[in-house]
Amino acid sequence: MNYLIDTHCILWCISDPEKLSKNVLKIIENSSNRIIVSSISLWEIALKIRLKKLEISGFKEENIPELLTKMNIEIMDFSGDEAILFSKFELLDHKDPFDLFLIYLSIKRNYTLISRDSVISKMKLKGFKTIW
């Protein structure tokens, strides 16, 4: 199965895996699952570090791609078509553009989004699946 990881889960995978649910740990550890990080999440991390809204410790942010690769987590780019067609995505009562784009990618690519975000988990959209 294909799983897309929300941004906060990326950081927990790397530095604080005990914050992940037992269910999520099982999913990530199952080699038959494809675990994916969107490049938009990496940009969100970089942006928050730059704006001093996120501080990380125990590793350097420039090592995140390598650390993910070592954990068999795939980094996925999004296409120009996906970026521009996001403008047609049903606007939701959620203001975080990064979350909205991850939801959009999850639906478009038929991925299940791994997220602890309670606002995301309550969203009812056709084709959207989330798990924690």
Image (cartoon, rainbow, N blue to C red):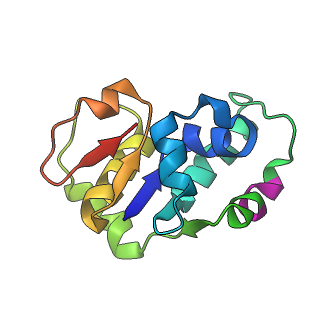
Q: Is residue 13 left or right of residue 21?
A: right
Task: Look at 21% across and 53% down and name the residue there.
Answer: 89
Q: Is residue 56 above or below residue 42?
A: above
Give yes or no for residue 63 being in the magenta stretch: yes
Looking at the image, which is closer to me, 18 or 89?
A: 18
* Image x and y of residue 91, in percent: 21, 41
Q: Is residue 32 above or below residue 24?
A: below
Task: Look at 39% across and 64% down and name the residue there.
Answer: 2
* Image x and y of residue 78, in percent: 45, 69
Q: Is residue 79 left or right of residue 9?
A: left
The magenta region covers: 62-66
Residue 94, visible in the rendered structure: no
* Image x and y of residue 95, in percent: 35, 31
* Image x and y of residue 124, in percent: 16, 37
Give yes or no for residue 55 being in the magenta stretch: no
| Location of the N terminus (image quadrant) | bottom left
Looking at the image, which is closer to me, 4 or 72?
A: 72
Q: Is residue 125 left or right of residue 48?
A: left
